[in-house]
Image (tube, helix red, strand yellow):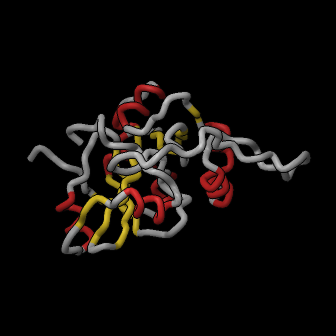
């Protein structure tokens, strides 16, 4: 994307309010079956466990300041902007679709429209993002959503061995390899980023 400072990591549009600062799950008592506290949103933490990725819970990082945009997240983490994975919700003929895009690129709506065979693709409103994913803008993770949607992942995500994505709140992120992220999101690999051509 050509201008990334204003584009959130979890979706586009104005923030409708941050998730609670404490994303940690309750420990639920002693014993080996007790969930491990995490900086991830509880729903996302449960999704990681369900997907066999519980080891990522210990790698979730929480920051005192919001990392709502890709640029804020990259600065907080100390990684390249293109290592941030943005989870962006669009409406394709009124149906929500998730697009996973690297933080240094913008989504080309014409390419998304062509990929989906849709007549019209627009950015989803904040209330649609919340209803579809269960998360607020700026904290939408790449999977673990309230509702299943079609998922497109831009090929640019494969340029790095490690990428970072929102962990369900505007304050938390997690690292993983792009292949794992794309597979767990159930995404179709596509080329939908804007180019200078």
Residue 124 falls left or right of residue 43? left
Q: Position of residue 96 (x, y in %)?
A: 37, 68
Which residue occupies the extreme right position in the image?
Answer: 31
Q: Is residue 70 above or below residue 19?
A: above
Identified at 37% across, 54% down, the residue is: 88
In the figure, residue 24 lies in which quadrant? top right
Q: Is residue 33 above or below residue 96?
A: above
Residue 38 falls left or right of residue 115? right
Q: What is the number of callouts on the image?
A: 0
Residue 30 falls left or right of residue 66? right
Identified at 63% across, 59% down, the residue is: 51
Q: Is residue 147 above or below residue 104?
A: below
Q: Nearer the viewer, residue 19 or 197?
A: 19
Q: Position of residue 133 (x, y in %)?
A: 49, 61
Q: Position of residue 5 (x, y in %)?
A: 30, 34
Which residue occupies the extreme front position in the image?
Answer: 17
Identified at 25% across, 68% down, the residue is: 115
Q: Position of residue 9 (x, y in %)?
A: 40, 44
Identified at 24% across, 42% down, the residue is: 1
Residue 80 falls left or right of residue 19? left
Which residue occupies the extreme left position in the image?
Answer: 197
């Amino acid at each position: 994307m050509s201008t990334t400072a204003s584009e959130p990591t979890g979706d586009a549009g104005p923030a409708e309010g941050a998730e609670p600062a404490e994303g940690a799950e309750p420990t639920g008592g002693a014993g080996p079956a007790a969930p491990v506290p995490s900086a991830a949103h509880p729903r996302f933490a449960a999704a990681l466990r369900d997907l066999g990725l519980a080891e990522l819970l210990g790698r979730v990082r929480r920051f005192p300041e919001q990392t709502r945009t890709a640029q804020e997240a990259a600065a907080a983490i100390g990684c390249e902007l293109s290592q941030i994975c943005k989870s962006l919700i669009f409406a394709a003929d009124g149906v929500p679709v998730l697009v996973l895009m690297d933080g240094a690129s913008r989504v080309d709506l014409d390419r998304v429209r062509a990929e989906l065979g849709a007549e019209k693709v627009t950015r989803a409103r904040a209330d649609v993002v919340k209803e579809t994913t269960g998360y607020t803008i700026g904290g939408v993770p790449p999977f673990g959503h309230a509702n299943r949607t079609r998922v497109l992942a831009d090929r640019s995500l494969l340029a790095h061995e490690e990428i970072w994505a929102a962990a369900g709140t505007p304050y938390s992120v997690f690292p993983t390899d792009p292949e794992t992220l794309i597979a767990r999101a159930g995404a179709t690999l596509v080329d939908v980023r804007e180019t200078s051509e």
